[in-house]
Amino acid sequence: MRILKELFKIYLLFIALFFLGRLALYALYADRLSDISFAQSLLAFLYGLKLDTMTASIILILPALVLSLTPQYFAKIATRLLNGYILTFLLLALYVENATFPFVAQYDVRPNYLFIEYLKYPKEVTSMILKEYPIQLLVALMMLLLSAWVYLRFSPLKLQEALRTPLWKRFLLLLPITALLFIGIRSSLGHRPANVSDALYSTNRMANEIAKNSLYSIGDAYYSYSKESDKLVQSYGKIDLTEAYQRVSTCLNIPRGSSLPFNRPEPTHFASSKPKNLVIFIQESLGSQFVGFSGGDVSITPNLEKLSHEGLAFTNLFSNGTRSIRGLAAMSSGWLPVAGEGVVKRNKSQSDFFTVASLLKPLGYKSSFIYGGEGRFDNMRSWYMGNGFDEVIEQKDYENPSFVSTWGVSDEDLVIKANEKFKAHTARGEKFVSVMFSSSNHSPFELPDGKIEFIKEKPHQGVENAVKYADFAIGRFFELARKEAYYKDTVFVVVADHNVRVYGDDLVPVNMFHIPALIIADGLKPQKFERLSTQPDVLATALDLIGVNLAYPVLGHSIYSNSKQEMALMMFNDTFALRVHNKVAIIQPNKEPLTFTYDNEHLKSIPHDRELEKDALAFVKVMDDMYNKKLFKMPI
């Protein structure tokens, strides 16, 4: 029985580590559990124990096999290998538990697929961590070193003694040990094994996050997102695909085409013999709380406020998701979120995927994507170049920029470069469409001196001052553009990709998807548009304003169209929220759908609206089907 005792010790080591991490997280965010009882909040530890057991059981597979099958002759070597294996996983688990706290502070969720994504960009991420979290990094390093020393010096494990047990006795224990580990990994007697969705026991999202296990969440995210499989989509529920398309068609008020769904002719409401250029300036992490016309602090963004009185301001606009690639796809293609990884990074959308560049290329438009950072980040260069854009301008293309941060050249350098590009197009008599993407409003918020008057009560390298600098760059861009001939012939869009930090206790913090957008064009009547809108609606409106009849599959409508609906589809991690007016259906993997009303910027639970919940599921299925079958493209 010695082998069982040693395996149980290993199990307790990991369970204790996970428990301490969960306890610290619970203490740190206890104030956000006020809407549920103390007993209910403690359930996070019970559900958490299940996920911790699953994680520890997976780790125990190799030690169980080695201890059961290794001959005594190799006991010393096997002991060293097992100690190295166990110590490696203990340090990994300790590192992830440490990383959980800044990750939750930034993203309001435990480490998930984003944690893996950022590992692909060591230069940017390492620089950001060193500048943003130096103390936390030092503490984590000291904990790792101390833990390694304690384990090597005072390890309670007696693995070599367990291996001295006769091999035949250990071999006889292999079957019951394997059965125990199988039960631990499955942690369910039902048809399906337990998974991360078992932690979603409450409508209080922070309680659910406390219940999760970070190491398991990372592994689950890697498995789900790396395969591009149907398993993730299937986990949301079942619906006939024909019915799903019909529901989406009705919800969007867009007829379904025979070959390419939702591709349709859209006559302009502003017919002109000279179509306008189109510039879409996407703002990194610009939430509505920083912009006056969308209900925020006008003092932070005075240039946006001034521009809102000159053009069309969207005051009730909601983003597709919480990642830049979701916003880029929405504003460059009119696409809605798809389960799993965003289309900017997925294989089947690297060519023949509809974009504004492919739409306007037959009309003679030159196209560009202008960014201040490295185009390889989030696969942006590959996606834009593969889908109709003539040119991608990135950090290496700037000569002597005035300021360079972790994420690239400053927004001011970006707008100066863009202005020069647009002047060159005009000089050659070329029409153009361009997507610009800012980067200054990104942690660690490095900003040049002498450009803005820093907000005194806020840190210089803080989000408010970063937004104020982004607003300065927007003002600088329009200051430059107004002096050029292209200005009166161009439709300008300024829109956020997502909010700066999406947090809140609701299953989906809908209020944190609220973002600003405005459209400026010569002759456009100033207006505040207050109806519920999405990023594809903004794109469709901008395309309407360039003054030419078009046919496209954009999943939204111009505000000047009678077909415009008040709906928004939002994705928060793996959770989808379909909002129609002020009713919201939420669907999560392997969980029953829920219905809420959106009132006073929070979700309030109401009885199931089965039709709305089916509509939400329909969107998940249809977006996935359109991606997999490459149905979102220009007609031939």
Image (spheres, rainbow, N blue to C red):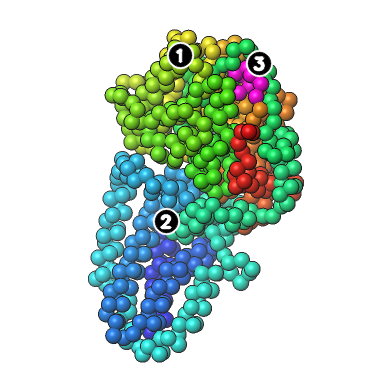
Of badges 1 and 3, the one in the foreground is: 1
* Residue 336 is covered by the magenta coloring: no
Image vertical order of residue 34 relative to residue 408, above or below: below
Left or right of 380? Residue 630 is right
Q: Is residue 546 magenta?
A: yes
Q: Earlier in the sequence, mark 1 or mark 2?
A: 2
Q: Which residue is mark 2?
A: 24
| Residue at the image position 38 percent from the left and 52 percent from the top | 99
Residue drawn at (49%, 36%) of the image: 386
SS category of the residue bearing label 3:
loop
Q: Earlier in the sequence, mark 3 or mark 2?
A: 2
Is residue 186 at all visible to an observer of this figure? Answer: yes
Residue 378 rendering spot, x and y as whole percentages: 44, 41
Q: Secondary structure at mark 2?
A: helix
Rendering coords of residue 219 (x, y %): 46, 58
Answer few, some or many: residues within 10 Å of disc 2's Cα (few below 14, many 20 plus, some between 14 and 19). Answer: some
* Rendered position, 311 above or below 221: above
- What span is in magenta? 542-550
Tag shown at residue 428: 1
Marks 3 and 2: CB-CB under 8 Å? Answer: no
- Residue 453 lies, with reference to residue 79, above or below; the image says above
Q: Residue 636 or 33: which is nearer the viewer?
A: 636
Relative depth, front residue between 134 and 247: 247
Report if the CB atoms under discs 1 and 3 are less than 8 Å apart.
no
Residue named by callout 3: 270
The C terminus: image quadrant: top right
Which of the two discs, 3 and 2, sits closer to the camera?
Answer: 3
Which of labels 1 and 2 is toward the front? 1
The foreground one among 84 and 267 is 267
Location of residue 398 by image quarter: top left
What's the CA distance linking mark 3 and mark 2?
Answer: 59 Å
> Gap in Å between the C-alphas at discs 1 and 2?
62 Å
